[in-house]
Amino acid sequence: MKGIEEAKAFYEQYGREMLRRKFPEFESRIAVGLAGHGSECYGYDDEISRDHDFTKGFCLWITDEDDIVTGIELAKAYRQLPLEAAQQNSALGGGRGVSRIGFFYRRYTGSSGAPKSLEQWVATPESALAEAANGQVWRDDLGVFTAEREKILYGMPDDAWKKKLSARAAIMAQSGQYNYARCIRRGQDGAAMLALGEFVKAAGEMIYLLNKKHSPYYKWMFRGMDELNVLRDMREPLEFLLLGDNDETGKVTKSGVVEDICAAVIKELHKQGLSDGNWDYLEPHAFEIAERIEDRGIRSMHIMEG
């Protein structure tokens, strides 16, 4: 059974009754679910996941006003449930139990909910936005927690989206189409692999953005690509860039695969009306996307920022 399924079953067995019996006047004001840090919040967990930051717990999200009245008692009641903590815990793990709604989101966005400004949308890493809105919400009668979650999932302003796309296009061009081949010609295999690493990460994030989805933490990027609609078939060539040999003399070369990936991305940029250019190199596409940004401040940011 997946961790998120165990968490829901644990809530159904113990948590629901605890709330009904001990907090009847607040039960309909508490959002319940599992979201945030951890592979189980994406449904990507396995047996290996259980050696670190893994518990049976779930999340209880409450407003600041309710926290003042009942937060301490609610947290105490939650800790009395038959929880089983993981053997190892990191400073970034946890997040289960009682949390103020604003505090939960502030861990990921820096705000009490979704980013509040264009600048904040641009500056917030996609992986943080993904963690803020992953998992499941099983109950939220009040709707406050879910409203911010929906904004994060579907509410990124077009200008912030285009800025992130332009940055990924510029990084892909510089790292994959330009620097990788130059490093190989110089015999700098280590630098070449670093260049490919930059390219693969930027390309993966680009593909998520073209799907209007937030890219998860890097180690789950490939796993999540299987759930996408647009360019999901790029997973295998991207993995080849990391796993194959730096042999530029064979029938299939990494430089050729880089160009194939860039060509597929450019085709999708055309399809979505983000660029009209016919260049094979992604850098001019990056600037064309940026030119379509309406906000002058965001448009004037460094091309690779975002």
Image: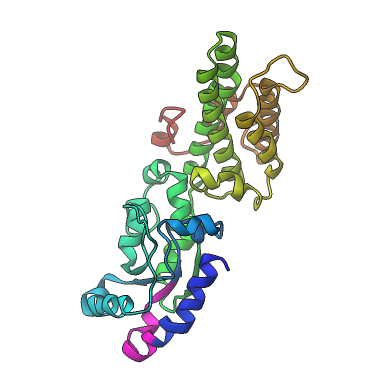
Q: Nearer the viewer, residue 171 or 159?
A: 171
Q: Nearer the viewer, residue 194 or 305?
A: 194
Name the spot of residue 71 as percent of width and height, x first.
25, 75
Asked if residue 279 can be seen in this view, the reply is no
Name the spot of residue 25 as percent of width and height, x first.
32, 88
Name the spot of residue 126 as percent of width and height, x first.
47, 45
Name the spot of residue 52 as percent of width and height, x first.
42, 56
Which quadrant of the structure image shows residue 296?
A: top left
Q: Nearer the viewer, residue 97 or 53?
A: 53
The reply, left or right, for residue 114 in relation to residue 76 is right
The reply, left or right, for residue 4 in relation to residue 100 is right
Q: Residue at x 53, y 21 (%)?
A: 174
The reply, left or right, for residue 202 in relation to residue 109 is right
Which quadrant of the structure image shows residue 58?
A: bottom left
Quadrant containing the N terminus in the rendered view: bottom right
Classify 33 as above or below 197. below
Q: Residue at x 63, y 21 (%)?
A: 281
Q: Is residue 233 magenta?
A: no
Classify 23 as above or below 4. below
Classify 57 as above or below 187. below
Asked if residue 81 can be seen in this view, the reply is yes
The residues colored magenta run 18-32
Q: Nearer the viewer, residue 248 or 180?
A: 248
Q: Is residue 28 magenta?
A: yes
Which quadrant of the structure image shows residue 283?
A: top right
